[in-house]
Image (spheres, rainbow, N blue to C red):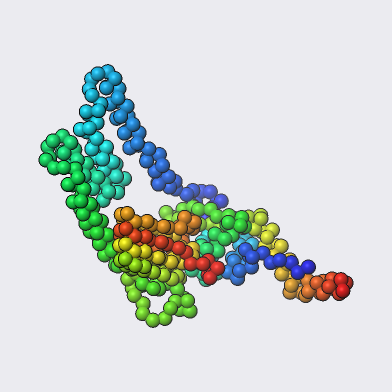
Amino acid sequence: VLPELDPVIHAPSRLRLVTLLAGADEPLDFPRLQQLLELTAGNLSTHLRKLEQAGYAEVTKAYRDRTPVTWVELTPTGRHAHATYLAALRRYLDGEGARDLLRDEDGVT
Amino acid sequence: MSKDSPSAGAGAVRPERPDRRAGRGVGGAVPFGVALIAVGVLLLLGQLDVLDPARVAAEWWPLLVIGAGLWWLFTRAWLAGAFALGAGLMLLGITLGVLDAGLGNLIFPLFLLLVGLLLLTSGVRLRRATAVAGDTTARHGPAAQRPAGHVDRRPSATAVFGDARLRLYDDGDDPEALVASVTSVFGDVHVQVPAGWRVRNRTSALFGDVKIPRDQPTYPEAPVAELHGLVLFGDLKVRYEDPEEV
């Protein structure tokens, strides 16, 4: 009854990253993500790879003024996973999941 | 869609440039193809009784070594190219009777020559490496992660008949590249790199093994740890820190 929380999203840095990407209407570039999330380039790179490997984020590499830039956006799978995560979290936060679990247990005993 | 986002098309963003190294797989077939053509021509001329392939091969086989040397020079593998070219010319001199020396007598001096060249070139690289700021046990890292104490600004590790470990930290200064130098002579050097970094191997290995993680990030913004130095009858093992620690 208490739903699983997606471990790919649940890590604090990745939750912030996914939330930011979910709230953006357009792809965000690597330096901006780094600045907004206050992560080191290495840490952002690590979390980005996790999201990419899970199929939650899509990365596009391009050049801007001869400088390579990585653009990131959530895939439909990533957006769905984020929505599912939020719904699951709500069940934790409003206590509904816990009440359902206790009710089920009382019914069994 | 913003003006400079990847889908914006014209404007500040251009599609990714093709990787120059992408053609290397094809380029690597060139020397092999040339060698096959040479052998084919030789056999053909033999069938036509123009020359004796066995005798020609016995005298001119060092041309293959010379060709390999030229190819390596062409691909900017200067050390291997220079060595192969020099060795090939010397061997050609012997097979043609210009030089009076036995092949067996040359192996040891040639080996010493190669090791000396490797040491010299790795020395140059080490000097370059130490010109870049860094530290032995901690390069970057928030103060909470970085071990307190001495901070060496020259990240290096040397293992001679033993093990040495070098751990690099990420403190968010975001350098374009951190250069560390390693020397392994009959020993193992273990380097731990922060998760999310790219590792670039610039070491010279002679009868040594360099193990670099294959699963590396490809983002151009990811920091780079560049490893220079010499691996001689030893191992250089690079691994990432546990990404879950990030």
B79 lies left or right of B224:
left
Q: Nearer the viewer, residue A46 or B245?
A: B245
Asked whether residue A20 is in view, the answer is: no
| Residue B98 spot, x, y in % from top left | 12, 37
| Residue B180 spot, x, y in % from top left | 35, 65
Asked whether residue B238 is in view, the answer is: yes
> In the rendered image, which quarter is residue A23 located in?
bottom right
Q: Residue furthest top?
A: B48
Q: Nearer the viewer, residue B192 or B25?
A: B192
Position of B41 relative to B27 (above/below): above
Taking the spot 53% from the left edge, 53% from the top edge, the residue there is A60
| Residue A41 spot, x, y in % from top left | 48, 65
Taking the spot 44% from the left edge, 65% from the top edge, the residue there is B193
> In the rendered image, which quarter is residue A76 located in?
bottom right
A101 lies left or right of B161:
right
Taking the spot 16% from the left edge, 39% from the top edge, the residue there is B94
Q: Residue furthest bottom?
A: B149
Q: Nearer the viewer, residue B27 or A26?
A: B27
Taking the spot 43% from the left edge, 66% from the top edge, the residue there is B192
Q: Report the number of numbered marks.
A: 0
A66 lies left or right of B51:
right
Which corner quadrant holds the N terminus of chain B?
Answer: bottom right
| Residue A93 spot, x, y in % from top left | 74, 74
